[in-house]
């Protein structure tokens, strides 16, 4: 969309006028400040004389693809805090926790 916008000299103001919305809304959508819905994406595509194509397919687990089973942290234990005692000079981790809570 950015390439087409640039190639045709379309401004955010022109897109906003075609859609009947404020330019700031187009700015937020195109800059990623807000999440686009399929509807808003289709409306912007229409204003740019483009169409949206969506294809659902089985995942390909090739190089560069995330595999939930290997990247998920679900099922792992709680995070351990290591060497917390160093920060306050105490060798007792429980004392460190108590001191941290008292500082909050």
Image (cartoon, rainbow, N blue to C red):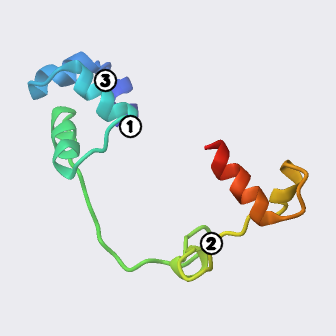
Direction left: furthest residue: 20
Other residues around mark 3 within 10 Å, as few (<14) / some (14–19) / many (≥20): few
Contact flag, marks 3 and 2 (Cβ < 8 Å) = no
Instruction: Identify which residue, 88 or 28, lies in the foreground.
Output: 88
Q: Secondary structure beneath disc 2?
A: loop
| Marked residue nearer the N-terminal end (2 or 1) | 1
The local crowd at label 2, few if under 14, some if 14 to 19, many if 20 or more residues have their Cα within 10 Å, is few
Instruction: Kindly report which numbered mark, 2 or 1, lies closer to the viewer in this rendering.
Output: 1
Q: Disc 2 versus disc 1: distance between alpha carbons?
A: 27 Å
Q: Which residue is mark 2?
A: 63
Measure the alpha-carbon separation of dots 3 and 2. 36 Å
Disc number lying in front (3 or 2): 2
At label 1, counting other C-alpha atoms closer than 10 Å, the crowd grade (few under 14, some 14-19, many 20 or more) is few
Residue 33 percent coordinates (x, y): 37, 34
**Depth order, front residue of 73/1:** 73
Q: Which residue is mark 3?
A: 8
Callout 3: SS: helix
Marks 3 and 1, Cα distance to the nearest angstrom?
21 Å
The image quadrant where one finds the C terminus is top right
**Which one is earlier in the sequence, the residue at label 3 or at label 2?**
3
Residue drawn at x 38%, y 37% as measured from the top left: 32
> In the picture provided, is 77 more to the left or to the right than 13?
right
* Residue named by callout 1: 32
């Amino acid at each position: 969309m950015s390439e087409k916008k640039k190639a045709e000299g379309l401004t955010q103001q022109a897109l906003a006028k075609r859609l009947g919305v404020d330019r700031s809304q187009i700015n937020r959508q195109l800059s990623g400040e807000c999440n686009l819905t399929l509807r808003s994406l289709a409306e912007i595509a229409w204003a740019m004389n483009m169409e949206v194509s969506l294809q659902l397919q089985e995942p390909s687990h090739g190089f560069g693809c995330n595999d939930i089973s290997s990247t998920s942290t679900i099922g792992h234990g709680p995070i351990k805090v290591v060497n917390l005692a160093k920060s306050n000079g105490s060798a007792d981790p429980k004392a460190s926790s108590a001191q941290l809570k008292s500082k909050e």
